[in-house]
Image (cartoon, rainbow, N blue to C red):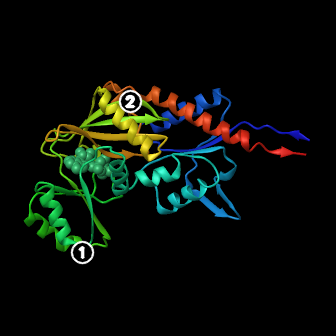
Amino acid sequence: MTRSVTAPHVGIWMYENGGGREIEQRLVHALAERGIQTSTGLNLRDARAKDGQISCNGVVMEQLDAFLSYNAGQQTQFQVYLYQALSQAIPTLNNYDAFALAEDKFRTSHLLNSQGICTADYRLCHKNDMDGLKQALRDFGGKLIYKPTDGWGGVGIVKIDSEQALDMLLPFLSRTDLRYFYVERFIDYDNTDYRIDVVDGKFVGCYGRKAPKDDWKTNITSGGSVFVREPDDEVVELALRAASTLGLEIAGVDLIYDREREEYVVLEVNTIPAFATPEQEALGINFNQAKIDAMVELIERTATQHNALHTHKVA
Ligand SMILES: Nc1ncnc2c1ncn2[C@@H]1O[C@H](COP(=O)(O)OP(=O)(O)O)[C@@H](O)[C@H]1O
Ligand SMILES: [Mg+2]
């Protein structure tokens, strides 16, 4: 009996805009240097599942040694469903369970809090529990934020700073197909945040974002701008703990400083944090290489392990 040893094979689906295409090339190149074969462009939108296999652009996904899913914003329910199914067969990055957990703002806050990691005070109320909502407003000192638990880019986030405002919003909210309300205390902060990139349990980079004038949302899509920012050890430590508590291999942890309580707070944990764009790199935000290096190491280890366990034996 001979054993045909094939090189580890990794599938990649990566965003292409904002310099993504170039980052992907650098990943592919670095992996090739380590003897790892890659197939790119594996958009699960193009996949078909049948007879126990998911095929995508001629690749049988289950035969891969790992799959890197790195395209935010374009994920349909179909894709996420296949991502989940695929993760039962091969290692995915991120692993699906951690991805799904971090995509849910309530479950994330709830878990982080239970592990003693500071987030904004939050509350989940049944959609008919108006008393609970009003109580939350009082408990949070008169200001709260309504957030869709699966939102992104600051979309759908509403600040409510009085009981009248809440009363005005309720008829609108009850018309939508909401199942529950997730609300957070509105944190008094300087309208800047920290984005800490974590790969494989290691800190790989930090930058700051600033909300536009007269706004408190730091999202780039809300008009926020990025700036070079050095984190202190406390911020980094908090970000590392948040990523590991959620079980994410790759994470972008957003934190702000609560001026009232004088402490750092984890706001959310992103599962597909973008690399610095060429424009951002020109501003001096220079973590891309460190992040690529850490990702290559992570992918290599993951795929090699899987490959060693599943080497095909042929008679
Ligand atoms: N509890 C809060 N208090 C004050 N500002 C907040 C709070 N939660 C979010 N924000 C602001 O709103 C932005 C978007 O919120 P976030 O939870 O990150 O959702 P998204 O997934 O839409 O980015 C944050 O970057 C921050 O600037
Ligand atoms: Mg955010």
Amino acid marked by disc 2: Gly
Tag shown at residue 196? none
Q: Residues within 10 Å of mark 2 (few under 14, many from 20)?
A: many
Q: Secondary structure at mark 1?
A: loop
Whether pointer 1 and pointer 2 mark residues with C-beta atoms closer than 8 Å, the reply is: no
Measuring 16% from the left and 46% from the top, which residue is drawn there?
215
Percent position of residue 62, x then y = 67, 52
Residue 188 lies left or right of residue 231; in this view the side is: left
Question: Does residue 81 sit above or below 39 in this rendering?
Answer: below
Q: Secondary structure at mark 2?
A: strand
Residue 126 lies left or right of residue 74; in this view the side is: left
Amino acid marked by disc 1: Asn
Percent position of residue 15, x then y = 47, 44
Question: Does residue 140 sit above or below 308 in this rendering?
Answer: below
Tag shown at residue 205? 2
Residue 140: image quadrant is: bottom left
Q: Nearer the viewer, residue 96 or 40?
A: 96
Spatial distance from mark 1 to mark 2, Cα to Cα? 43 Å
Measuring 55% from the left and 57% from the top, which residue is drawn there?
84
Disc 1 residue: CB within 8 Å of ligand 1: no
Residue 54: image quadrant is: bottom right
Which numbered disc flags the more N-terminal residue, 1 or 2?
A: 1
Q: Is residue 222 visible?
A: no
Nearer the camera: disc 1 or disc 2: 1
Tag shown at residue 128? 1
Count of number-bearing discs: 2
Measuring 64% from the left and 26% from the top, which residue is drawn there?
33
Disc 2 residue: CB within 8 Å of ligand 2: no
Question: Does residue 147 sit above or below 285 in this rendering?
Answer: below
Q: Quadrant of the N terminus?
A: top right
Q: Nearer the viewer, residue 127 or 206?
A: 127
